[in-house]
Amino acid sequence: MTETRVRDPIGTRKRCGGEDPGARDYIGAVTRMGVRIKGVLGFTSPPKLDAATPASHQQAQKPCGVKGQHGPSMTQQTQKFELPPELKKYPAQPTPGQKTEDQIHSSFNKLMSELKKPRAPYVLSLANRLYGEQSYQFVEKFLNDAKKYYEAGLEEVDFKMKSEAARVDINKWVEKNTQGKIKDLLPQGSIDAMTRLVLVNAIYFKGNWEKKFPKEATTDGQFKLNKTQTKPVKMMNRKAAFPLALIPEMNSQVLELPYVGKNLSMLIILPKEIEDETTGLQKLEKALTYEKLMEWTRPEVMRQQEVEVSLPKFKMEETYDMKSLLISMGMEDVFDGQKVNLSGMSPNNDLVVSKVIHKAFVEVNEEGTEAAAATGAVMMTRCLRIPQVFNADHPFLFFIRHNPTKSILFYGRFCSP
């Protein structure tokens, strides 16, 4: 079982001084942004060895993004989010009088409805909430749109006098909406009397493998950290037919492990050999783009074949302060009290983003995946065919994908047990 839980709060404080083409483009933008963040995280110093980060962190940013920002602040985010500034390429069947900026949020709402289909053979819950200072005035349209498109209602709290109690309440809400997997999202000191608004997003995913790994086949193994170092690990083993492809230019394999129902899959990209003295992934991560990820995992190249799969059982949890990362990617205005324009949220335009905290949990075992994150098999004639080997006993990248929309819900890097 794989389990993933993720939470993203954005803190703002008062400044001292059918197929919907819009949804398809939105998915591409989210995934493209996620891949860029993945690359930045991969080359921090020291590098994060275990990075489990969902593209869904955009869900927390969007209500205060296009909806709340005006002027250069909005232009900067749409550029870094890789959406066109005019937003007019989204003919998402707008209702009469609907502004083009609303089309992005409408497309996101449709995507969330697709992901949360009733009676799905997996558990995927998404929750959003705004925590606002009770004495502060917010733009009514911002609050209405946040509730309409993101189901993010406003909870009025007393940040001025009871900031610590508010922090505890927010953390409890997060813990509840991630089935207890994400605890203490906001550390002590992250909320104070100057805080005016906290935007929080929680996502929880739990899915069982379509083809489970037999528990009796799990063995003790050695995971190669690099060319010279290893660590003990429990390796799950299974021989069955799975979609598998080779990426020749990267000397890597990509394997698809479907979850029950096949609407969701885990994609694993594994370098065939360790080529450097660190994680073995640097060449792959430097080359990885959204377009290449889509190309490498096209159904035409992912051929169903007999594969001997060895995959480590793992559990990982990471917390990131996304502020410095987003600034390094060029999204600095929202953190700068002299430049930011959040007049779409505040009639006084006196807000500035102070923190973006992201926390993720992923667990992979024989049953499937838990995270806080199509039928039609190709039949092949039986013959004396040697099974392919996919032995993930060294660092790899993984992605959890919603197959009907090609949306990447979670992504990460496993480098050490």
Image (tube, helix red, strand yellow):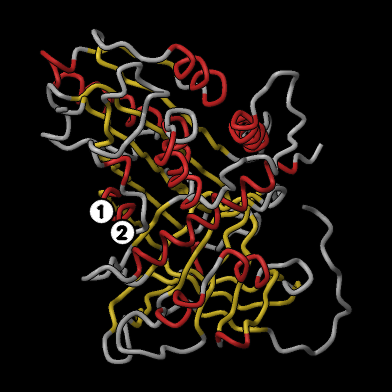
Percent position of residue 293, x then y: 60, 67
Percent position of residue 226, x then y: 32, 85
Secondary structure found at label 1: helix
Q: Is residue 227 above or below residue 17?
A: below
Relative side of 260 to 394, left or right: right
Percent position of residue 189, x then y: 11, 34
Q: Residue drawn 48% across and 69% down?
A: 236
Residue that badge 2 annotates: 328
Residue that badge 1 annotates: 324
Q: Residue drawn 16% across and 19% down?
A: 165
Could you say which disc has been placed on residue 181 in the image?
none
Q: Nearer the viewer, residue 59 or 261?
A: 59
Q: Nearer the viewer, residue 109 or 237?
A: 109
Q: Residue drawn 66% across and 32% down?
A: 110
Evaluate whether residue 111 shows in this view. yes
State the count of labels: 2
Secondary structure found at label 2: helix
For residue 386, what is the image quadrant? bottom right
Relative side of 385 to 214, left or right: right
Q: Is residue 376 above or below residue 188?
A: below
Looking at numbered disc 2 in the image, what kind of residue is underneath it? Ser
Looking at numbered disc 1 in the image, what kind of residue is underneath it? Ser
Evaluate whether residue 1 shows in this view. no
Q: Are marks 2 and 1 in contact (CB under 8 Å)?
A: yes
Percent position of residue 223, x then y: 35, 79
For residue 279, what is the image quadrant? bottom left
Which residue lies most toward the top here?
Answer: 135
Q: CA distance from mark 2 to mark 1?
A: 6 Å
Badge 1 density bin: few <14, some 14–19, many ≥20, Cα 10 Å? some
Q: Quadrant of the C terminus?
A: bottom left
Q: Residue drawn 47% across and 44% down?
A: 75
